Amino acid sequence: MEEILHKSIRQIRALLKKGELSSVELARFYLERIAAHDSRINAYLSVTEDLALRMAADADRRIKEGTDGVLTGIPFGMKDILCTRGVQTTCASQILRGFVAPYDATVIRRLNESGYVHLGRINMDEFAMGSSTENSSFQITKNPWDLSRIPGGSSGGSTAATAAGLCAAALGTDTGGSIRQPSALCGCVGMKPTYGRVSRYGLVAFASSLDQIGPITRSVEDCAVVLGVIAGHDPMDSTSIPEAVPDYAADLLKEAKGLVIGVPKEYFIEGVDREVKEAVEASLKVFERLGAAVVPVSLPHTEFAVSVYYIICTAEASSNLARYDGVKYGMRKEGKDIIEMYKLTRSQGFGKEVKRRIILGTYVLSSGYYEAYYRKAGQVRTLMRGDFDAAFRQCDLMVTPVSPTSAFKIGEKTDDPLTMYLSDIFTIPVNLAGLPALSLPCGFDGQGLPIGLQIIGKPLGEAKILQAASLFEAEMGLPKIPPAFL
Amino acid sequence: MKIDRAVVEHVAHLARLQLDAEEIDLYTQQIDRILAYMDKLNSLDTTGIEPTTHAVPLGNVFRQDTIDHNLQVEEAVKNAPERKGTFFKVPPIIEVE
């Protein structure tokens, strides 16, 4: 049965359709793996075993009837920020403990229609604020490649579970790198689609102008298959793009001749680990061998990205998180009047990083500082978008590192928020410009830790990214699951 | 110093957060450092540049004004920490003499 871990979603689906494997057997296989291995990495907040087996039985019925879809019977881990009807949805925060979502996020509805199986809720940084999953108020998730290290964040639970073979695929969310950075650090494939490509309805909001939902998988092909299911216009999200969804898997492995890859020189700066730099440079050689041309490009405002991002995302977060007031859902701490009730509830319900961002965000929006911070950040964001527009006139895709280093030690950066923020430098600009980007493994460092490669595309250019990534992946043939979990 | 303890206390009040002395010290020092780092934005001349609020330019989106199957009241209030019937229950907001 272990060979299932090395099969793609389409290969597993073929087995299910032929009756060589049942969805219930597949669900049990993953549930047993979670029971046996998750205590080593703490990726799952809760396992929805009854729901999983019910959904799997339903999947088997659909297969028998011939009404199945591309994900029927495929077991998923779900980042605990996506509202799932009848299931506790906490965002790894005390303030939402006990909240049972009364409706499905659009991505959940689409997965349901396709027949997926929900294995359980997956750990994350509280409200997706963090780069290491250490900000979860429930548990610390560990990197399956080295249990003394963080898996990245904020979707670190999703990438740890996927890498360790504790789900076939997972969904994550990405506001400033929260799918791509943990995918790089855990050796997964993770994609942040174009802003508006996937509906945000039912995604608990962190920074609404930056948030996107995307797949986390063990192969580029699986990423294409899952994206094809969750993408598409949704009237419930007014920022959703009304464009048809292409067949993302159609161009996989088609040759790369004529492809022009831009390499932004600002992404190869001091502070990037030597082994990361070498792995990315070696990857560019691979692309050249595959027939692509590699050209230097420039994104001159890159050095301002972290400042712009932490003004905009904290401002939006301070507004979005005002809804947690102890009235409508979640936790409440009684006070002598309503103001005290608000204050006690929010102070005890939110963790350190969330409070830090609410205070910073409230400050940059407050009267007297709005112009100097929030408005200024929006203007520099315009300049950064212009950088990408200009660079993409010279190339089809850009290739960069994902994270300046491989996975760091648990506790190494928790006392220094600015240093933690700076580790997002290569992923943040993509969110600010609303572009699609994918992270995929490109090698291992001397300590055996995965290194990720970022491929950035033009708006709605997901298919081209996946095409290039699939060629690269086939050429490299890197292991996806750490030996300790096989 | 870009900010001091008094500013952090004031902003925390605006955000309806109650911080203890230790948290105020910590946040003052950390946010001061973050704001100092953000100062580099001032080295850019952005005169006349329109700020971006959304990366994908979309106009306002309207829907038809028709009845849809939305969340039922009972479903909408069932997560409330305290409720009375189909109402959310909160502490007194206006003092009664």
Image (spheres, rainbow, N blue to C red):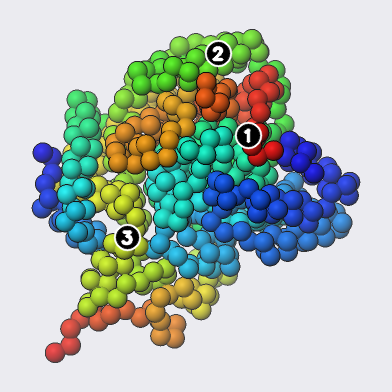
Q: CA distance from mark 1 to mark 2?
A: 23 Å
Earlier sequence position, callout 1 versus callout 2? 2
Quadrant that contains the N terminus of chain A: top right
Tell whether label 2 touches label 3 (CB within 8 Å).
Answer: no
Question: Which residue is the site of mark 1?
Answer: A482
Question: Which residue is the site of mark 2?
Answer: A282
Q: Where residue A362 sits in the image (x, y, percent)?
A: 24, 51
Q: Are marks 3 and 2 on the same chain?
A: yes
Q: CA distance from mark 3 to mark 1?
A: 41 Å
Q: Residues within 10 Å of mark 3 (few under 14, many from 20)?
A: few
- Name the residue type under label 3: Ala
Taking the spot 42% from the left edge, 68% from the top edge, the residue there is A330
**Which tag is nearer the camera, tag 3 or tag 2?**
2
Tell whether label 2 touches label 1 (CB within 8 Å).
Answer: no
Q: Where residue A353 sits in the image (x, y, percent)?
A: 33, 49
Decide if residue A150 is on the left or right side of residue B19: right
Image quadrant in which you'd find residue A260: top right
**Which tag is nearer the camera, tag 1 or tag 2?**
1
Q: Where residue A305 sits in the image (x, y, percent)?
A: 33, 31
Asked whether residue A191 appears in the rendered view, the answer is no
- Name the residue type under label 1: Pro
Question: Furthest-bottom residue in view?
Answer: B97
- Name the residue type under label 2: Ala
Numbered disc 2: secondary structure: helix
Taking the spot 84% from the left edge, 49% from the top edge, the residue there is A21
Quadrant that contains the C terminus of chain A: top right
Decide if residue A134 is on the left or right side of residue A346: right
Q: Where residue A293 sits in the image (x, y, percent)?
A: 57, 10
Question: Which residue is the site of mark 3?
Answer: A322
